[in-house]
Amino acid sequence: MYAADGKTKIVAAQIAGDFTLPADPSQKLAFIAGGIGITPFRSMLKYLLDKRQRRDIVMFYVNRTSNEIVYKDILHAAYNELGLKLFYTLTDTAAIPRDWPGFVGRITEQMIWQTIPDYTERTFYLSGPPEMVRGYAKVLESAGVKSDQIKQDFFPGLV
């Protein structure tokens, strides 16, 4: 934005919202990212890596194809250095690599039970396209996760 005198004008605001790491580092967390919805989680994990702060976090990262997976360096560093439990899942069943080690398809209650036995004790963070976030919130609620344990962040306009 430019001011009338031609000088650059910057407008800033304070960081706000509840899609941030909880103050209590012992709180168990679960992250579910869809596509570019990985962005806020990347920031959280980078912060934890910089602070060398381990937290009990289980993460699902959902993409259509393996080529869409981004921030592998941060994710793998968090896995190796912080103990992040990381699960990838791909939804385009026609494009699954032959040696794919992750899940295939959308996240289901069964996947949650299988990978997160203590899921009712966790706070879930969901980030991605609105339809995905709403859908996974319903899956979690069907699995018995209370709505106040689910934090949502949307990336409107993304499919």
Image (cartoon, grey):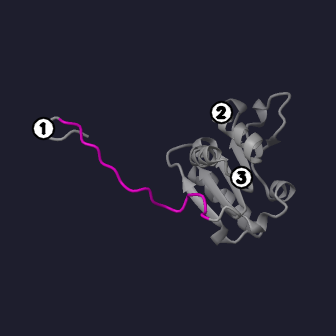
Circle 3 residue: 54
User: Of tags 3 and 1, which is closer to the observer?
Assistant: 3
User: Splitting the image into 4 quarters, where does residue 13 fall?
Assistant: bottom left
Kindly tell me whether residue 90 is visible in this rendering: no
* Residue shown at the point (16%, 35%) measured from the top left: 6
As for residue 52 lying within the magenta part, the answer is: no
User: Splitting the image into 4 quarters, where does residue 126 fall?
Assistant: bottom right
Indicate the secondary structure of the residue bearing disc 2: helix
Image x and y of residue 31, in percent: 68, 53
Q: Amino acid at mark 3?
A: Arg
Q: Quadrant of the C terminus?
A: top right
> What segment carries the magenta color?
7-23
Main secondary structure found in the magenta portion: loop
As for residue 22 lying within the magenta part, the answer is: yes
Please tell me which of labels 2 and 3 falls first in the chain: 3
Q: Nearer the viewer, residue 117 or 144?
A: 117
Circle 2 residue: 68
Question: Vertical placement of 133 versus 75: above or below?
Answer: below
Circle 1 residue: 5
Image x and y of residue 4, in percent: 13, 40
CA gap between label 2 and label 3 equals 27 Å
